[in-house]
Image (spheres, rainbow, N blue to C red):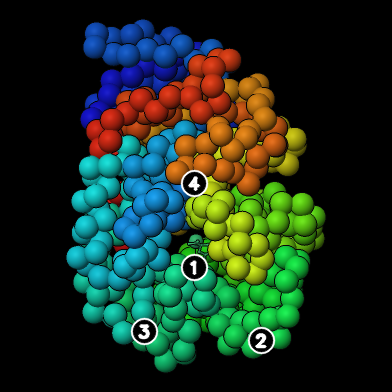
């Protein structure tokens, strides 16, 4: 569905500045931006009076795990997309460590078809690399809905893994598009897993999967990219050492991202929150967090993502080291980043750059990521004055919890808009969850990528 919508009296978050004005979406696309306002409503047009609200481009979260197929009791493409929309996210890119893994064309076609019936936002999918699926990787290159190849260079949730040099070379030499790597060094991990097997304290997780483990794999991925002149995106950077090293290696060839939780949490939160914030690569130390902020601001890091990886609280209750790694986050990333902005960590225009324009640029998503005439009408209207304490019961994810439970977040999406149609809304003073107002599959389209 595409909408005709006029947003009046908004505070427009344009790429370089914030100004008052109106914005018109016609046939799903941004038709007119009037700085200073003055647009009158046309026939057949819905109108939102956005007085007091900031208008941002819809957020693109290029790193989520929506668990379909295989673990739809934790999340599926409908619940995940509704959670996304609740957080101002209008497009997502979903990872391939499913059950079965998404490692060939038929499994991607199935996911795209399921998303067309279930998702209320736009969607794209990664194909997972194995040591012997080169022809599958090649067969989906340039296909609509396929954003790139995901390589787990170190073991994490699921059994996708490619770590031997010969197999990595083969993939970098014989495929196109974006390769996204989970960069942790498998050999080092295996050695350290033995060494740390007697430790049951959660602090040992970051000692075991240490900075060196991430750094070795990041360097290896970067040298493969340079050798084969292959586009590389390093997912969830966690250490200051990697970020500093990437500072002068970056060009158009290598891009990278940081998760909201790595910008927010440190070793003290791991002690406080335990298994809830257990993930791979781990939450590290305060100095890593501060360097990640610095390298985000200087452009070394291109975008901010969630790695939304839902696990049930029952599974988390197994305790360390048995609890699964990963935490939900797709519905809280924008309020969390807006809270950081409110506290002076960054500007709202930075957030639009890191969460909207950045992901669009990294993956070559056409016509998305900024308030520009001719671009798609994917938008979110946020109330920067709304300050609410979030609890587990306020969440849309099927697993029903958030690592930010108990935190006061300031800056909440009041409307999330896909192709000019409102898909999620909150009312002033109403429930924090708000209302998901789109029916399954009625909004959201398959994403197209410039590969
Ligand atoms: O902590 C993680 N959880 N890291 C990953 O790499 C995968 C994710 C998951 O799928 O649960
Ligand atoms: Zn992930």
How many C-alpha atoms fall within 10 Å of the one at disc 2: few (<14), some, or many (≥20)?
few
How many C-alpha atoms fall within 10 Å of the one at disc 4: few (<14), some, or many (≥20)?
some
Is the CB–ligand 1 distance for label 1 below 8 Å? Answer: yes
Viewer-side residue, 331 vs 323: 323
How many C-alpha atoms fall within 10 Å of the one at disc 1: few (<14), some, or many (≥20)?
some
Expressed as whole percent of the image width and height from the top left, the position of residue 5 reads 33, 19
Please tell me which residue is depicted at 56% across the width and 43% down the height of the picture.
401
Expressed as whole percent of the image width and height from the top left, the position of residue 98 reads 37, 63
The disc, 2 or 1, on the residue closer to the chain's N-terminal end is: 1
Please tell me which residue is depicted at 27% across the width and 24% down the height of the picture.
3
Quadrant assignment, res 142: bottom left
Quadrant assignment, res 248: bottom right
> From what the image shows, is residue 158 above or below residue 273?
below
Q: Which numbered circle lies on residue 157?
A: 1
In space, the residues marked 3 and 2 are separated at their CA atoms by 25 Å
In space, the residues marked 2 and 1 are separated at their CA atoms by 18 Å
- Label 3 or label 2, whichever lies nearer to me, is 2
Please tell me which residue is depicted at 44% across the width and 40% down the height of the picture.
84
In space, the residues marked 4 and 2 are separated at their CA atoms by 32 Å
Q: Which numbered circle lies on residue 202?
A: none
* Residue picked out by circle 4: 399
Q: Quadrant for the N terminus, please.
A: top left
* Residue picked out by circle 3: 131
How many C-alpha atoms fall within 10 Å of the one at disc 3: few (<14), some, or many (≥20)?
some
Please tell me which residue is depicted at 58% across the width and 81% down the height of the picture.
185
Is the CB–ligand 1 distance for label 4 below 8 Å? Answer: no
């Amino acid at each position: 569905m595409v909408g005709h919508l006029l947003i009046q009296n908004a505070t427009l978050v344009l790429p370089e500045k914030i100004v008052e004005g109106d914005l018109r979406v016609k046939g799903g696309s941004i038709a007119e931006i009037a700085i200073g306002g003055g647009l009158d409503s046309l026939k057949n047009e819905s109108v939102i009076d956005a007085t007091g609200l900031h208008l941002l481009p819809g957020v693109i979260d290029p790193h989520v795990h929506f668990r379909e197929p295989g673990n739809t009791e934790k999340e599926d493409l409908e619940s995940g997309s509704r959670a996304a929309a609740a957080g101002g996210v209008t497009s997502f890119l979903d990872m391939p460590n499913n059950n079965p893994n998404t490692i060939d064309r038929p499994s991607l076609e199935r996911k795209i078809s399921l998303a067309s019936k279930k998702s209320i936002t736009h969607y794209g999918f990664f194909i997972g690399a194995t040591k012997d699926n080169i022809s599958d990787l090649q067969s989906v290159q340039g296909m609509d809905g396929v954003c790139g190849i995901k390589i787990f260079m170190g073991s994490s949730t699921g059994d996708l893994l490619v770590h031997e040099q010969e197999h990595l070379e083969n993939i970098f030499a014989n495929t196109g598009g974006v390769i996204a790597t989970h960069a942790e060094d498998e050999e080092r991990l295996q050695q350290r897993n033995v060494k740390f097997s007697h430790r049951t304290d959660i602090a040992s997780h970051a000692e075991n999967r240490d900075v060196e483990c991430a750094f070795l794999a990041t360097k290896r991925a970067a040298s493969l990219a340079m050798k084969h002149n292959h586009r590389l995106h390093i997912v969830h950077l966690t250490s200051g050492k990697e970020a500093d090293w990437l500072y002068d290696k970056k060009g158009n060839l290598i891009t990278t991202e940081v998760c909201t939780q790595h910008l927010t949490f440190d070793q003290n939160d791991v002690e406080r929150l335990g298994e809830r914030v257990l993930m791979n690569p781990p939450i590290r130390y305060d100095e890593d967090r501060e360097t990640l902020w610095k390298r985000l601001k200087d452009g070394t890091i291109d975008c901010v993502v969630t790695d939304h990886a839902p696990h049930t609280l029952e599974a988390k209750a197994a305790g360390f080291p048995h609890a699964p790694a990963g935490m939900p986050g797709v519905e809280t990333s924008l309020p969390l980043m807006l809270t950081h902005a409110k506290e002076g960590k960054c500007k709202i225009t930075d957030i639009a750059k890191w969460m909207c324009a950045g992901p669009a640029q990294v993956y070559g998503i056409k016509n998305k990521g900024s308030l520009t005439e001719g671009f798609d009408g994917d938008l979110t209207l946020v109330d920067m004055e709304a300050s609410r304490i979030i609890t587990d019961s306020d969440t849309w994810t099927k697993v029903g919890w958030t690592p930010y439970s108990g935190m006061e977040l300031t800056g909440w999406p009041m409307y999330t808009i896909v192709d000019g149609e409102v898909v999620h809304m909150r009312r002033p003073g109403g429930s924090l969850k708000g209302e998901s107002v789109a029916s399954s599959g009625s909004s959201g389209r398959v994403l197209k990528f410039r590969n």
